[in-house]
Amino acid sequence: MLYLKIIAIPCFVLSNHVFRASAVPMDLNVHPEHLPYILNSRTDHNKSRCWGYESDCDIDHRYLDPVCPGPETSWAPTKRDQIDTFYDQGDFGYVKQQREEITHMCEPINQDDSSLECTNHLKFCRGHNIMINFENILNKNHPIRYQMDVLSSGQIGGKCKLHKEKLDAQCDHLSPLQSWSPELRFFTPIENYPGKCDLIITEPTVIMKIDATVNMYHHFCDFLNLYASQHVNGSGASMFSKDIHILVWESFAYESAFSDTFQAFTKHPVWNLNTFRGKVVCFNDIVLPLLPRMIFGLYYNTPLIDGCENSGLFKAFSQHVLHRLNIDQKPNANEKIRITFLSRNTKYRNVLNENELITALKNYSQYEVKKVVYSGNFLTFKEQVHITYNTDIFIGMHGAGLTHLLFLPEWAVLFELYNCEDEHCYKDLARLRGVKYITWRDINKFTVQDKGQHPDQGAHAKFTNYSFDKDEFLDLVDEAATHVKKYKHGYSPKLHDEL
């Protein structure tokens, strides 16, 4: 494992009560393939390796170019236009757009003044020397989550020249998880900084408004957008420093079966609003990252053009998390195709004849079959990811567990047994990650237990259970195996050793 340690000694404000981090080591512990891209991102020339969003990054040198196989171009006029559209919708092209949109909402006049910069619609913002007053939380008699009244006028601000009309114009996506409008509409200039702050946080702080933490699909939208925001915000060796704080914008103590993922981003405990309840806090540097439910956002609500796949952003995210969590890939000594069958421990979308299907697979000597239940009651999250990363064919019903496709190897196949009439959810996520996707095609070859009953919407394909034709199932697995054998043979991850 390639590991560099760069020592940085930061300067601190010695005023009031300060959280200090003296002589803080800044660890550049990154996936080896990413190292030259990170180091080159700080330079203004000689971009032999670049992520794709840098102003002088040539297409031939960027991290990864999407592919759009076949002659069709969807609604794009040319194949190049089709590739570029996908790149802008779900790849580092999206990051480039955000970086180009950043503009001052509150501008410093003097060197030590505050600043606030944001992209259009306040999807992403960053600030320097920002005051936040958390006194309102004392008066809340109910837990805070997905609320837009956490702050009021004057409870967030800085010592800078506010462009109020510009800020107000960008507060048009006023929704808890779509933008930072609910909070920044109250931004007010202040005469003195740090003024009467009770605390001063010197380390960079990322404030996150997160989606449902119990659901892997939704929570990983948070993590993907956090990773993308690190690209939007920075460059060079410090952009992936773990010496940052995470403040979750709700009063609940953060808990999730997927909490280990935060270890890829911070070495500190995760804060919540109650951490600063009743306090006035000054943050030397804050980042308000891209959010999980943005209009035309990343991962969720992404309007992908048809026919394209393989986002470098999603691949880099997968590699970054795997590396930071120390998930390794074990050699497959017997050269069998490793099949993981994800069994659901839920009321609905169970495979009623899964034992029959698994037994049928085990009759084939070329397969090594493992049935798993991805639940903290049986496996830790890291253990789950390790199994996924060492899987060739991942099989399961429509459900959040299929989000594990983000951590499949390059050559692997996701076999969503049945999409339950939600056609694009995991198909598009597989396209973004760049792994092959297949699903059930002949609806006459599976049996539905009943029509299903949604609590509010009546009959619903997600609220019932299924049995699948064994022979059709084996044929689809054989199709997946053919793909694995074609692309896994001789595969070697591309490692860049340029510094």
Image: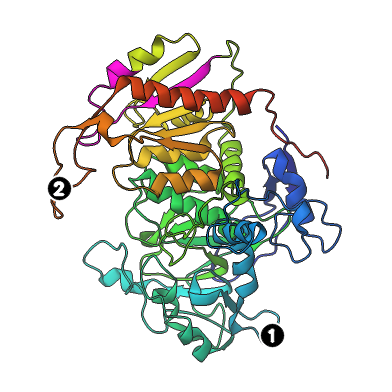
- Is residue 427 positioned above or below 95 on the image? above
User: Is residue 427 shown to the viewer in this render?
Assistant: yes
- Asked whether the beta carbons under mark 2 and mark 1 sit within 8 Å of each other, the answer is no
User: Which mark is in front, 2 or 1?
Assistant: 2
Q: How many marks?
A: 2
| Above or below, 183 relative to 27 | below
Residue ID for mark 1: 110
Q: Residue 60 at what x, y percent from top left? A: 77, 53
Residue drawn at point x = 21 percent, y = 66 percent: 141
Q: In which quarter of the image is the N terminus?
A: top right
User: Which three-letter amino acid code belongs to the residue tagged 1?
Assistant: Asn
Indicate the position of residue 63 as horizontal and vertical percent values: 70, 49
Residue 391 in view, yes or no: no
> Tag 1 or tag 2, which sits nearer the N-term?
1
Numbered label attached to residue 382: none
For residue 477, what is the image quadrant? top left
- Looking at this view, name the residue that lies furthest to the front: 71
Q: Which amino acid does label 2 sit on?
A: Ala
The correct choice, above or below, for 493 with respect to 368 in the image is below
Residue 340 is a magenta residue: yes
Part of the protein shown in magenta? 336-357
Q: In the shown orientation, is residue 40 left or right of residue 152? A: right
Give x and y (percent) for residue 485.
59, 22
Q: Residue most toward the right?
A: 46
Q: Helix or strand or loop: what does disc 2 sit on?
A: loop
The stretch drawn in magenta includes residue 65: no
Q: What element carries label 1?
A: loop
Residue at the spot 47% in from the left edge and 54% down from the top edge: 299
Disc 2 target residue:
459
Q: Quadrant of residue 398?
A: top left
Q: Residue 466: where, in percent of width, then height? A: 23, 31
